Image: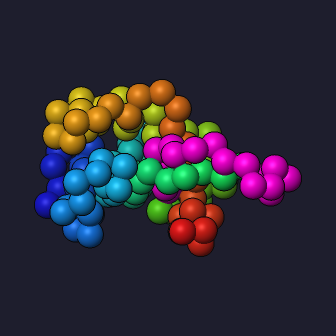
């Protein structure tokens, strides 16, 4: 079931409900944007071990929180999605801290579902 937090719909994915480790949690986010893209934005928030681009073989950035954009126009609207994710990040931070005991502060990444879910 979705919870509304500062205008953002968020819920934990069913498959991670019973996992005690916060880093294994996966969240689904929906946000109705009326400013930048003028549509419903669908996002997953997951924690992954992020690898550097191919030219840095066997290099890792470590575990990072990643906003996975589930819309096919990510490449054309990368900057707008960046602004939206930053805004969503600020809106749900207190909720994630209070409900799940972690603060997704600092660096977070954004990418498209086509690139992220192919690698998992």
| Quarter of the image where one finds residue 120 | bottom right
Horizontal side of 63 relative to 25 (left or right) equals: right
- Answer whether residue 92 is magenta in the image: no
Q: Residue at x 22, y 54 (%)?
A: 20
Q: Does residue 85 sit above or below 71 in this rendering?
A: above
Q: How is the image coloured?
A: rainbow
Reply above or below: 32 against 19: above
Determine the residue positioned at 41% across, 28% down.
105
Left or right: 18, with 107 as reference point: left
Q: Residue furthest right?
A: 55
Residue drawn at x 32%, y 31% as measured from the top left: 103
Please indicate whether residue 103 sits to the left or right of residue 7 in the image.
right
Q: Position of residue 97 (x, y in %)?
A: 24, 33
- Residue 112 appears in the picture as rendered: yes
Quadrant of the image for the N terminus? bottom left
In this image, 37 relative to 41: left or right?
Answer: right
Give the magenta range: 53-69
Residue placed most toward the observer, 21 or 16: 21
- Is 66 one of the magenta-colored residues? yes
Instruction: Give x and y (percent) for residue 24.
Output: 35, 56
The answer to whether residue 29 is seen in the rendering is no
Tally of marks:
0
Q: Position of residue 46 (x, y in %)?
A: 42, 53
Q: Residue at x 63, y 43 (%)?
A: 61
């Amino acid at each position: 079931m979705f919870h509304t937090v500062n205008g953002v719909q968020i819920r934990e994915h069913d498959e991670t409900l019973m996992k005690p480790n916060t880093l294994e949690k996966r969240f689904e986010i929906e946000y109705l944007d009326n400013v930048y893209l003028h549509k419903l934005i669908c996002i997953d928030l997951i924690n992954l071990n992020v690898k550097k681009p191919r030219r840095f073989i066997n290099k890792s950035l470590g575990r990072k929180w990643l906003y996975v954009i589930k819309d096919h126009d990510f490449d054309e609207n990368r900057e707008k999605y960046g602004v939206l994710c930053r805004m969503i990040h600020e809106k749900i931070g207190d909720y994630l801290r209070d409900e799940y005991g972690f603060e997704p502060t600092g660096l977070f990444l954004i990418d498209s579902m086509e690139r992220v879910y192919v690698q998992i």
